[in-house]
Structure formats: C-alpha cells, structure tokens
Image (tube, grey):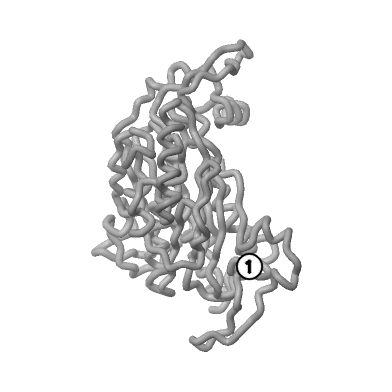
Amino acid sequence: MSSTFGTLYKVSTFGESHGKAVGAIVDGCPANLELSEADIQPQLTRRRPGQSAMTTARDEADKVIILSGVENGKTLGTPIGLMVNNKDQRPGDYGEMSQVPRPSHADFTYQMKYGNRAASGGGRSSARETIGRVAAGAIAEKWLKQQFNTEIISWVSSVGDIDARDMSTESLTREQIDSNMIRCPDEAAAEQMIALVKKTAARKDSVGGILTCVVRNIPAGLGEPVFERMEASLAQAMLSIPATKGFEIGSGFSGARMFGSDHNDPFELKADGRLGTTTNFSGGVQGGISNGEPLVFRIAFKPPATIGKAQDTATFDGEATVLEARGRHDPCVVPRAIPIVETMTAITLMDFVLRQAYRQA
C-alpha cells in the first residue's frame, strides 16, 4: 500500500477509521522550526467530525500528540511522530455491511486487491485517514508562512447545483470562510447550500460539491517538469483525498472554449518590481512551473457513498439484497474537506521548495 507522499518533505500516514489511533510520520522537516501541538490543532479542529449539522455526528476531539522530533519547542530535523487517538469508535455499526459492499464505496475494491479489509468504517479508505495528512500539512503551512508569508485559502464554491460567485481574486480569510457552517463566503449562496444539505440529510441521502483553493505568496520557479509539474503534483495530492472526482487549475475546462488571444496572460512590471501577469488564466503555473502569481484550482467531490437511504445491491456472494447503511456519515463532505485541501497543498509546496533549495545549494 502506498501510504507515503513527498520526496524531501515526506509524509507517511497510518491507522484505520475504527482502530485505536491514526497519525503520521513527517520526515524532512527542517530543524529549529518552533512547533507545538497548538500550531497543528486548529486545522484538525476544522476537520473534526461533529462540529455542525453539516457533518457526521461522530464525536471526536481529534487532539494531536507530538510523539517525536521536537524538543524544547523546536524541531530537531528528525522524524516527527504525530498521533490522534480514536475515542468514539462504533465498529458494531458496520456488522451488516461486512457482507455487503457499499455501492460506490471502496469495500469491494479493497477486498479484491488485498483479499481482506477493515470492514469497520472503511479502514484506510475512510476520510479519517486524512487526519495524519492534516497534522503534517499544518507543520508545512507554518514553515511556508514564515519563509514566504504564504497564504493557502480554500472554500466551498458549489454544493449540488448551487454555485457561489467567483471569489478567487478577493482577499478572503479563514475567519470569513468559517463564519457559516457550510464554509462558503458568499452568504446568499451559503444559505441555499445549507438548506440543500439539510434537506438531503433528512431524506438519508448525500450531495457533492466543489472547493476552490487559492495560494498567495509563493515564489516563481517551483515545479519539476516534465512528469512532476506543479499542476500534476497538485492534482495527485488533491485526487488522493477520498471522494474526489475532478481537478482543474486556472481556467480549467472553460479554457478549452476560449481563443488564445483571450486566454493568454500578458506580462507587466508589477508595483513591487517583479515581472508578473495582468490576468491569471494559467492559475499561477506555466510550463509546469509556478510563475509567482496566485495558484488557483478547484476540486470536485462526489456525494458520500454511505447513505441511509435503501439501495438495491448485492452481497459479496452475489445475492440480491437491500442496504440501508448504518453509522454516522457526512451528508456532504466539502465543508470538512477544506483543511484537507489546504494542508495537502502545503505539503506539496513545501516539498517543491525544499527540492528547489537542494538544487541551488
């Protein structure tokens, strides 16, 4: 199983949804970064279940413990061990599903690949695996902020067929995004999104959505063409998140409908003395390398597969059955996916920065 991401900033996650704990090992973090659990906890708290009517009712505090790699409040340059204990496991909720692969879930494919699987909550295929990523990415966020004043901001831009207005050029803050439970800074659209999710949950169904992410203040020159282009590595990072179904950067698919004369980003001398572009259809990346403009990309999330609504399906033995899934699950994952997207972005960028520094050393 591939549980490690990164080249110089390496993150390896461990644990199952209903096991004793989940977490990560971070290898490659530079020494002497001031670090404590308090630096990591905010993003975990934004990701935790049970925080609103938009999320699963599973009650987990998700308190992180730093096991290694930090002494006297500073990183040692050695592997950083991070752990979050599981407190509210209910493996009994999944007894019925041990014999019935959930439609569009990983139950069937994990069983086919490994000949075994963690039937309780999906094990490693559960979004609970992302806790380790979020903890590791929060460290990368702090390092990038100190080095470049990098800001990584993500928000809900669509739920179902409800779209927020384009806010990718606005100076949004996490406080603005967290001001409502759906985490959409367009208040008018947010009200409609919340109503849709509540209505969907009431009928034991689920709904998908889209996140937009903007990264400001990253240096030009990051990315490793040809196979580890900036956008290719970001796409890998984003599509490794459970429930993702699409990734686009800059103009994305809409750019295919434009003419080059409209889509090209002309250069100009910026007020700060650097060469930049007047528009940003490229999404901050040209030739697979960051150009110094904000990174702008979007990630599509499918409706959560585990729903309480009755579904005609079949057991592993092929016997027709009806499944009404038990357990506690999100009717829409996008509000809780925001810190996952932000921290996976930070991990990707920090790895590129370290690789660039190694090349220039």
Please give left or right for residue 106 compared with residue 93 in the image: right
The percent coordinates of residue 197 (x first, y second) are: 44, 37
Q: Residue at x 61, y 11 (%)?
A: 319
- The quadrant the N terminus occupies is top right
Can I make out residue 300 in this image?
yes
Please give left or right for residue 300 compared with residue 262 in the image: left
Q: Nearer the viewer, residue 237 or 252?
A: 252
Q: Residue lying at the far left in this picture: please name it.
A: 72
Image height check: is 260 above or below 60? below
Q: Residue lying at the far front in this picture: please name it.
A: 188
Q: Residue at x 30, y 48 (%)?
A: 64
Residue tagged 1: 281
Please give left or right for residue 349 compared with residue 113 in the image: left
The percent coordinates of residue 338 (x first, y second) are: 44, 51
Image height check: is 65 above or below 346? above
Around disc 1, counting alpha carbons within 10 Å, would you say few (fewer than 14), some (14 to 19), or many (20 or more)? some
Q: Residue at x 50, y 67 (%)?
A: 169
Total marks in image: 1
Q: Residue at x 32, y 48 (%)?
A: 45
Q: Nearer the viewer, residue 81 or 352?
A: 352
The percent coordinates of residue 311 (x first, y second) are: 55, 20
Res 152 quadrant in image: bottom left
Can I make out residue 25 in this image?
no
Q: Amino acid at mark 1?
A: Phe
The percent coordinates of residue 223 (x first, y second) are: 60, 67
Image height check: is 191 above or below 72? above
**Tag 1's secondary structure?**
loop
Res 320 quadrant in image: top right
